[in-house]
Amino acid sequence: MRRMRPPRDPLEPMASTVGCLTGLTVIFLLLSLLVHQAAWGNGPVCTSVSADGIPMRIFRLAVEGQVRGSQATIGTVNLCVDHPGTLLRFAGLLASWPSGILWLGFLLQIRGLLKIASRPGGLYSLATADRVRRLGWFLTAGALAAGVIQMVANMTIFLSQIHYPGFNWFEPDKLHLSTATLLAGLALITVARVMRVGVTMREELDVTV
């Protein structure tokens, strides 16, 4: 007699992958508190600005092996404070961490969604649709918040090192939003609405039958 295989979990391998990524992200963020590195906000506090957006005096820029008749320009300039105070140290963290926190929050939201979906009948339920909608709003609002926070932090670091007249504190080109994250969030909100309609129609059909 042929042995029947147990049914596969429809949420795998997503559930296991999300669990591993969540653990690795937490470990990475904890290690970043210990490692002295500018990119993680606990080394020299730095910010990058476009070379076109600030006045610079460059007398000569040459690249080794550059052919005659070509020009070399600087795209971005890194401005760093080697020994920042408390305010700049905090600004450095805000300039580096929002994306990581958003990623961690996304993974935790996914874990909660998979937990509800794994319940009996939970894959096609209003609770799952609500979780999908919550995840969509989290990504949409989180992407906007992360972009604004990082912009303010970077401008704070910039203004602590550069002083010249005619510079507006708010520059639209300094706001960098993750378009992919925004679109993913809006798409999930739409999917959640479709799921709610489908679940409601299914419940009405079951009552009618």
Image (spheres, grey):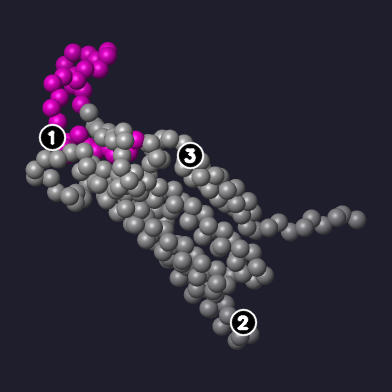
Q: Is residue 45 above or below residue 191?
A: above
Identify the amino acid type marked 2. Answer: Asp
- Farthest bottom residue in view: 208
At 53% across and 57% down in the image, what residue appears?
Answer: 108
Image quadrant containing the N terminus = bottom right
| Disc 2/disc 1 C-alpha distance (Å) | 70 Å
Main SS of residues in magenta:
loop
Q: Position of residue 19 (x, y in %)?
A: 60, 51
At 31% across and 35% down in the image, what residue appears?
Answer: 83
- Farthest left residue in view: 165
Identify the amino acid type marked 3. Answer: Leu
Q: Earlier in the sequence, mark 2 or mark 3?
A: 3
On the image, numbered disc 1 is attached to which residue?
A: 55
Left or right, 4 with respect to 173, comes to: right
* Camera-nearest label, 2 or 1: 1
Q: Position of residue 98 (x, y in %)?
A: 39, 50
| Disc 3/disc 1 C-alpha distance (Å) | 36 Å
Q: Is residue 153 above or below residue 142?
A: above
Magenta segment, which residues? 44-73
Q: Which numbered marker is on residue 206?
A: 2
Q: Position of residue 72 (x, y in %)?
A: 21, 23
Image quadrant containing the C terminus = bottom right
Identify the amino acid type marked 1. Answer: Pro
At 61% across and 85% down in the image, what residue appears?
Answer: 207
Left or right, 193 with respect to 175, comes to: right
How many numbered marks are there? Answer: 3
Q: Earlier in the sequence, mark 3 or mark 1?
A: 3
Q: Earlier in the sequence, mark 2 or mark 1?
A: 1
Q: Which numbered marker is on residue 34?
A: 3
Q: Which numbered marker is on residue 13?
A: none
The answer to whether residue 182 shows anywhere in this view is no
Q: Secondary structure at mark 1?
A: loop
